Image (cartoon, helix red, strand yellow):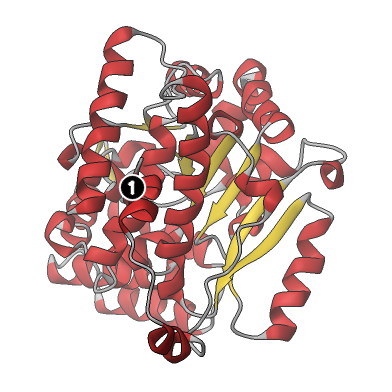
Amino acid sequence: MASVVAVKTEKRPAADSQDADSNAKKPRKLLPSLKTKRAPELVLVIGTGVSSAVAPQVPALRSWKGLIQALLDAANDFDLLEEEENRRFQKHMQEDKNLVHVAHDLIQKLSPRTGNVRSTFFKDCLYEVFDDLECKMEHAGKHLLRSVLQLMESGALVLTTNFDNLLEIYAAHQGTKLESLDLTDEKKVLEWAQEKRRLSVLHIHGVYTNPSGIVLHPAGYQNVLRNTEVMREIQKLYETKSFVFLGCGRTVDDTTFQALFLEAVKHKSDLEHFMLVRREDVGEFKKLRDNMLDKGIKVISYGDEYGDLPEYFERLANEICNRDVSTNGWGSPSQNGEEQQNGFNTQKSLLQDYHS
């Protein structure tokens, strides 16, 4: 248990060094109602803020605008757009129109149909944009992914609005295979919602490795909405578990997220979800906190800077997982022995990594 070992080996500072550190920034305290949750009670919602922290030099990971611009650049590099078409898309972005619809229109343009055949130019552009992510991951971001994986190993579910597979890449290096799911595979999504695929990441907008599953328009998840069994199981999660939003500044405004969770769930103010945000502007922070309360979401500050998130979330993950370890062995409600063994091995590698 990483936190226990750290406490035992830490030397008490001398009085003068204590005085020198008295003005140091104190870490944010962990909210009791969150840190006392068990991992199987949580659904982690990973937003663009996490991906941009893991690979900050990749503009496409930071925002919708960054992604669309990167796709436009790739399309122009491959001579897929006429000059007039490129100018039109650039104009829409500058006017700050609905960027989801702009992205949807761009995808349609890059996926022309000739007879019964649809081109795969969009796939080429996606791979160009997200190429070689593994080499672009930074150390601090890996710490954040390590904590997410640690909670997954202890039973938390994970969904994301991101197209990248940074978490899956990191997990593979830790000896754990995570499956990427999208809304086109209803059977697997149903099993995920029923907690039978805990070591899977649900990409509600799709993942770039499967372009056919990319969802950028309400029509894209129509089929899932029509499957009442899948929808009910997904919505039940929002009513029975606690969602923890990471790097999700505007996820609750996302049309796909609203359709899957918010619109169909009544009495949201009776729920207990959590959103970890940066407390840069006091007025904006209080406004966000007030706005989220009627959605059943507690807004929590992890610090004043983006760099404070990995340390805060690491402490939170250790607190939750160490409690599970002390009460339920490894605390992992695995479906079979092989999965449990994988979980054990990854926990061990995580702790070794923590001390290295």
In percent of width and height, residue 250 lies at 60, 63
Q: Secondary structure at mark 1?
A: helix
Tell me: residue 232, above or below residue 36.
above
Residue under the point 20% across and 44% down: 352
In percent of width and height, residue 8 lies at 36, 52
Q: Say which amino acid is labelled 1.
A: Val
Q: How many residues crowd around disc 1 within 10 Å: few (fewer than 14), some, or many (20 or more)?
A: few
Residue under the point 19% across and 71% down: 76
Tell me: residue 149, above or below residue 96.
above
Tell me: residue 211, above or below residue 161.
above
Q: Which residue is mark 1?
A: 5
Q: Quadrant of the C terminus?
A: bottom left
In percent of width and height, residue 313 lies at 47, 56
Choose top left, top right, bottom left or bottom right for residue 311: bottom left
Residue under the point 84% across and 55% down: 294
The answer to whether one can see residue 131 in this image is: no
Number of numbered discs overlaid on the protein picture: 1
Q: For this rendering, which residue is in front, 81 or 41?
A: 41
